Image: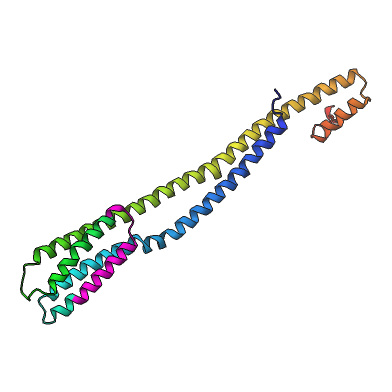
Amino acid sequence: MNKLNITTKLRFMAAIAPAILLIVAAVLGGAFHFFGTMPRAIYENQYAAARAAEGMENALYKMDWGRTQPDSSQIVMDQTRGFIAEIETARVHIGSREQAEKIEKIANDAKPLFEAMRTVQPGDDSLEPRLRDLQAAVADLMSVDDADLLATAGSAESSARTMIAITIAGAIAIPWICFIVIVRLSGGLYADLREIRRRFDALAERADSQSDDSRALDEALTRLGFSKPNPMLAE
């Protein structure tokens, strides 16, 4: 089985660094795009869901307050429309199964309650417990939305740490490792070529230094930077 020669090893090590840097550049480009679009994605999803839950809560409080006002029926009707609109917004921005279940429970509980509120007489507190339960359900949804937002932020932090590790390994550590390996390989090659030149000169003094093979070997060593020592410098 043929072993890798020194030239192949050097070329292989020299090719690893740029290849790794190309991969890292592609990964970093994707990461920059991901982190660049994340604020908008959070605003359009998690934050929008949280705002929808807050809108539901505000509608319920206004509805509770409006039941004691002279135009209570109109206030309840307006806040009912607003509450339903916020539910539809929340459905569009569902991010987890738990959110979906809570939104559907709120919608199912709200429909009969709102129908009853439109017919109840002012000052009748019989629906108060059901209204409080619905407010509690909305508060639970808001807690879930906050947890989802924190989870998204935690995922972004984890992705950032991963990208930092990839950058350090791919853009710094691996190129330097390749550089060190090339230096060691070339250092060994330098020592071997210098020894070849010394032994060749010693053999040339005892043999025919004008042969084609000798001249070819001498020229090859000279091209590699190991020319024959200058006798004047040796003296």
Query: In the drawing, does residue 71 fall left or right of residue 45?
Result: left
- Where is the N terminus found, in terms of image quarters? top right
Which contiguous range is marked in magenta? 77-98
Q: Main secondary structure of the magenta part?
A: helix
Which residue is located at x 21 percent, y 72 percent? Answer: 80
- Where is the C terminus found, in terms of image quarters? top right
Which residue is located at x 37 percent, y 60 percent? Answer: 42
Which residue is located at x 6 percent, y 67 percent? Answer: 126
Where 217 falls versus 165 (above or below)?
above
Percent x, y of residue 91: 31, 62
Q: Residue lying furthest top in this view?
A: 206
Where 33 falls versus 58 (above or below)?
above
Determine the image quadrant of residue 96: bottom left
Which residue is located at x 40 percent, y 61 percent? Answer: 41
Can residue 138 be spotted in the picture?
no
Can residue 32 be spotted in the picture?
yes
Where 127 falls versus 96 (above or below)?
below
Determine the image quadrant of residue 72: bottom left
Percent x, y of residue 21: 59, 46
Q: Nearer the viewer, residue 166 or 116?
A: 116
**Magenta span includes 92:** yes
Percent x, y of residue 14: 66, 39
Query: In the drawing, does residue 19 fall left or right of residue 7?
Result: left
